Image: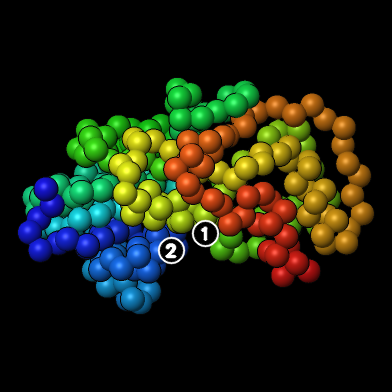
């Protein structure tokens, strides 16, 4: 049971760009949302900011009661050590502070499809994780730690997130670069990733332990670049390629009733590319 008096409360351990989107969605679902961040003044209203550094082992954390818990952390450095500080040390300390106040009714960890590894063919929640990069291995370890401390929790693995700035592929296309055009790409708009988290946390049915969040149409990198070039009005020579790499599937998430607002790169990248013209 969750702690007395915290019914309807949602706690965000991590309230960066994606975490804030999730928090705003939970607020719209009539939750009282508290966002933990090193600098609470960067937490957007109406989320209530709480200044805490989860990685600072010299400072004890207060008890953190909540009904709904979201762990959406951002590593303090992009290397493996930064990931360990954030996703292992910081997350463990945060979850222990939550546990001291009682078990949350729902809990969700935002991870990444990077833990799936560089495999071939269709990939879904039943595909064994094969993390290759060291940071991905740390994320997989964090998933296991989360499951150990909150066995009823849910891990959400978004694919390549976009939607908060001009996509990097725009500059790549302007430079005429088209490396490995046959490699499959998988993506999720940040709005859809946040919407998936809110959907799973607020629906009546208990969520499953793991979901991939990705759009409906994986595509070769060359196809995406050709689309961007056409949208920019640039000449582009399409390459004849054999697609290779992983194709992420969202069937399990779709089966819960989740519907992406941006089901393919056409709907998602189109307005972003137009804005960059």
* Residue depicted at 44% across the width and 43% down the height: 256
When the figure is inspected, residue 103 is found, relative to residue 232, above or below; the finding is above
When the figure is inspected, residue 112 is found, relative to residue 59, above or below; the finding is above
Q: Is residue 35 left or right of residue 170?
A: left
Residue 63: image location, x then y, percent: 10, 57
Q: Nearer the viewer, residue 247 or 241?
A: 247
Q: Nearer the viewer, residue 227 or 24?
A: 24
- Whether pointer 2 and pointer 1 mark residues with C-beta atoms closer than 8 Å, the reply is yes
Q: Look at the image and tell me whether residue 212 can be seen.
A: no
* Quadrant assignment, res 47: bottom left
Q: Look at the image and tell me whether residue 275 can be seen.
A: yes
Q: Is residue 210 left or right of residue 90?
A: right
Q: Which mark is first along the chain, 1 or 2?
A: 2
Q: Which residue is mark 2?
A: 21
* Residue depicted at 35% across the width and 36% down the height: 208
* Quadrant assignment, res 273: bottom right
* Residue depicted at 20% across the width and 56% down the height: 67
Q: Which residue is mark 1?
A: 191
Q: Nearer the viewer, residue 136 or 157?
A: 157
């Amino acid at each position: 049971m969750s702690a007395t008096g915290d019914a309807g409360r949602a706690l965000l351990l991590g309230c960066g760009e994606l975490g804030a989107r999730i928090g705003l969605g939970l607020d719209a679902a009539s939750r009282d949302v508290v966002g933990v961040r090193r600098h609470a003044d960067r937490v957007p209203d109406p989320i209530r900011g709480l200044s805490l550094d989860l990685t600072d082992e010299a400072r004890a954390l207060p008890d953190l009661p909540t009904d709904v818990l979201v762990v959406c952390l951002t590593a303090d450095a992009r290397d493996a050590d930064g990931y360990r500080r954030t996703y292992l040390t910081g997350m463990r300390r945060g979850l222990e502070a939550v546990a001291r106040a009682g078990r949350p009714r729902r809990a969700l960890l935002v991870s990444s499809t990077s833990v799936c590894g560089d495999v071939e063919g269709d990939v879904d929640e039943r595909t064994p994780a094969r993390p290759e990069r060291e940071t991905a291995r740390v994320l997989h370890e964090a998933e296991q730690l989360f499951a150990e401390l909150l066995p009823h929790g849910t891990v959400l693995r978004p694919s390549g997130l976009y939607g908060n700035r001009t996509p990097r592929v725009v500059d790549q296309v302007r430079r005429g670069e088209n490396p490995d055009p046959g490699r499959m790409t998988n993506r999720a708009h940040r709005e859809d990733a946040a919407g998936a988290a809110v959907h799973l946390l607020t629906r009546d049915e208990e969520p499953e332990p793991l979901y991939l969040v990705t759009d409906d149409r994986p595509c070769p990198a060359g196809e995406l670049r050709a689309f961007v070039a056409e949208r920019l009005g640039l000449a582009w020579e399409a390459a004849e390629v054999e697609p290779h790499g992983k194709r992420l599937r969202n069937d399990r998430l779709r089966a819960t009733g989740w519907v992406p607002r941006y089901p393919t790169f056409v709907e998602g990248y189109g307005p972003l590319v137009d804005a960059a013209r």
